[in-house]
Image (cartoon, rainbow, N blue to C red):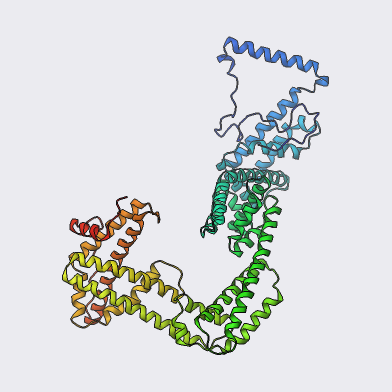
Amino acid sequence: MPVGNTTTAHLPLPINHVFHDSPVGKFHGRSRAATVLPSQAKRTGWNKVAHGMVRGWSRLLNAMTPGGVRVDPKYRHALKDTSRAVGDLLGNLIHPQGNLSSKALKKAFGTIENTAAPVTQRGVPLDQLLTQRFEVHLAQFTPAELKTLRTQLQILFADGTDAAVALPLKRLSQALSAEVERRVFADGRTQLLPRLKEAIAEAQQQSPRAPDTYNGLSGVVKNIMGQYGMNHAAKYGDETQLALSVLGAALNGFLSKGDVSASDIKTLLDALPSEDQAALQAADSAHWVARSTDLIDTLIADVAVQRQRHTQERFLAAAQGALLSLSPPGQVDPQGLRRIIDAAGQWKALQKHHGAHGLSTDPQVAQAFEAIVHHVPRLVLHQAALDELSAAELPALSKALAIFGNTQAEPTLAQAIDERLDWGVRECHEALLPVLDQLNQGDLHATLNALAATQRVLAKVKTQQELLKGLHQTGADDVRDFEYSVYEPLFANMGPDQLPRHAHALASPATQRLVETLRGMGQDLWNASGGDATDPRFATAEQLLGISLTLMQLADSANRAQATRTGVEAPAAPEYDPSQQDPDVRNAVNGVFQIPVN
C-alpha cells in the first residue's frame, strides 16, 4: 500500500484516500476492488432505508463539524474524479491504442490538473497530489501491469518527451520504482529467507554446498525482479550486479529485523569465496532505490579482515615449513615437497583475497615469500620423491615451483607426469583384455564380472588422469579425451589376428543386446532413485550406465582401428534401443550386480 499521507490535517479527505476505482481506468476491463451498493433499480426496501439512514447521519455530522471540514462534496468529488483521470492515464499507458504522442499526454495531464483544481485550491501542490495518486493506483497493479508500465515509460523517455510532461512522467517513474522495490522486497522476504537459512545451516555444518546455496539466492532475486521488469532497469545492463544489490539490501533488512543474527551471517560469509564476499559488498543499489546496507557491509568487512589475518598466519606457517625443507639446498623428501605445495597454495589464496578486497599485506608475508623465492632455484628433484606424490600433487608441485620462480624443474616434472599417465593407460589395458576375451568366448556371467572389475579400474585411472592433466571439469570433452588416450592405443597395438576378432565380438548382436539391457536397466534405476546420490539404486545405475558406455566406446574405437588398418570405411555404429532388453541378460545382471529393490 502507499506510504502515509503527508498532507495537512485541515483537508476534508486525505489525498491518498483509496476510492476502490479501477487502477487502470474505466476503459480497460479491470473490475473495481470493493463491493458497491446495488443500483437503485435492484435495491431492496432495506437497502433504501439503510442508505437513507447513512445519508441522514452524514448530514448531521456535517452540521455539527465546524466550518464543514468533515465533508466538502466539491473537494471529495474532485479528488475522486482526479483518481479516475489518473487511472485512465495509467490504463492508456499500459494499453496504448496507438502511439502516445506528447500532445495526447499533455492533454491527459491537463485534464488531471483541471479536474484537481478544487483540491489544489486547498493548498495541495499538484506534484504532491500526482505522486500520491500514482502510489494508490500502482499499489493495485498486477505484476504484469507494473512490468508493462516500466517498458512503456522506458520507450517514452527513449523517444524524448515534451518538457511539459517530462516532469510528471518522471514522478510516475519514481513512484513505479518505489512500488516495484516494495513488491520485490516483500516477495524476497517470503522466498529468500528460507533459502538463506538453509545456506546458513550448511555453512554451520561446514558443508561444501553452502556457497552454491548462497549463489542460488541471486537466482531467486532475478526471478522476482523479472516479474516486475526490474531486471531491465539494471545499471549498465548488469542484471547480476542489480540482483546482488537487492540481495545485499534484503540481507541488511533481515539483520535489522532480527530474522537472522549477525553471527549466522558471518558464518555464511566465511564459507564464501573472497570474490563472492567482495561482489556483495561492492554491489551498489543507489541507482534505483536507496536502501541501507550498512549492517551487511560491516559484517563483510569484519569477515574479510579476519580471513586476511588467518590466511597470512597460515602462509607464514607453511612458508616456515617450506624453508626448513629447502635448507640446506639440495634434495628434498616428499614431505618437504608437500610443504612447498602448501606454501604456494596459501600464497595463492592470500593473493586472491587481497585482489578481491584490496587489503594491505603484513610485511612479514612479503619477506617470507622472498625467502622461498631465494631458496627454490637450488631445489633438486629426485624420481624417488616424485613417485611418492599423488596424481593431484604432481601438477600442484609444478604450479608451486612456477609461483616461486623455479622453471628448471619443469622438464623433470613433465616427464614424471607423462610416465604416470602411461602407467595408467597400461593398467587399463591389462584390465580390458580379459573383458574382450570373455566377449569372444560368450560367457555372459564371466563377461559381466570382468566388466564390473574393469569399470572400477577405468574410473580410478580416469580420475588420476584428470588430476595429472589439471582437469577439473566433466562432460563430453573429458570422456572423449579418455577414450582416445586409452582405447585407441589398445586396438592400434593389437596383432593382425586379435583386432578383427575383438572388433567382431564388440559389434556382435550379443554385445548389442548386452549394451541395450545395461542402458535400459541403468536408466530405470536412475529414474527410480530420482537422481538422489544417497539412494543405493543411484550408485548401481551409474555403474550399469558406465559399463554400457565403455562397451560402446570400445566398439567405436575398434571399428576406427580396423578401418585405419584395412583402408575400408568403418561401418556405422549400431542403433542401441534401451527398451529392447534381453530377459536372459537382465537375469544375469541381477545376479552379478545384486540390483537394489528399493
Q: Is residue 74 above or below residue 533?
A: above
Residue depicted at 36% across the width and 56% down the height: 538
Front position in the image: 457 or 91: 457
Is 54 positioned to the left or the right of 498 in the image?
Answer: right
Q: Looking at the image, can residue 96 be seen? A: no
Q: Position of residue 435 (x, y in %)?
A: 24, 71
Q: Position of residue 261 (x, y in %)?
A: 64, 50
Front position in the image: 381 or 243: 381
Q: Is residue 431 above or below residue 300?
A: below
Q: Position of residue 109 (x, y in %)?
A: 70, 39
The residue most toward the right is: 67
Q: Looking at the image, can residue 527 be seen? A: yes
Is 97 positioned to the left or the right of 445 in the image?
Answer: right
Quadrant in the picture for residue 437? bottom left
Quadrant in the picture for residue 377? bottom right
What count of labels does the image hold?
A: 0
Residue depicted at 71% across the width and 30% down the height: 79
Is 515 positioned to the left or the right of 254 in the image?
Answer: left
Quadrant in the picture for residue 218? bottom right
Residue depicted at 68% across the width and 68% down the height: 358
> Can you say which quadrant of the picture contains the N terminus?
top right
Q: Is residue 206 above or below residue 18?
A: below
Q: Position of residue 93 (x, y in %)?
A: 61, 41
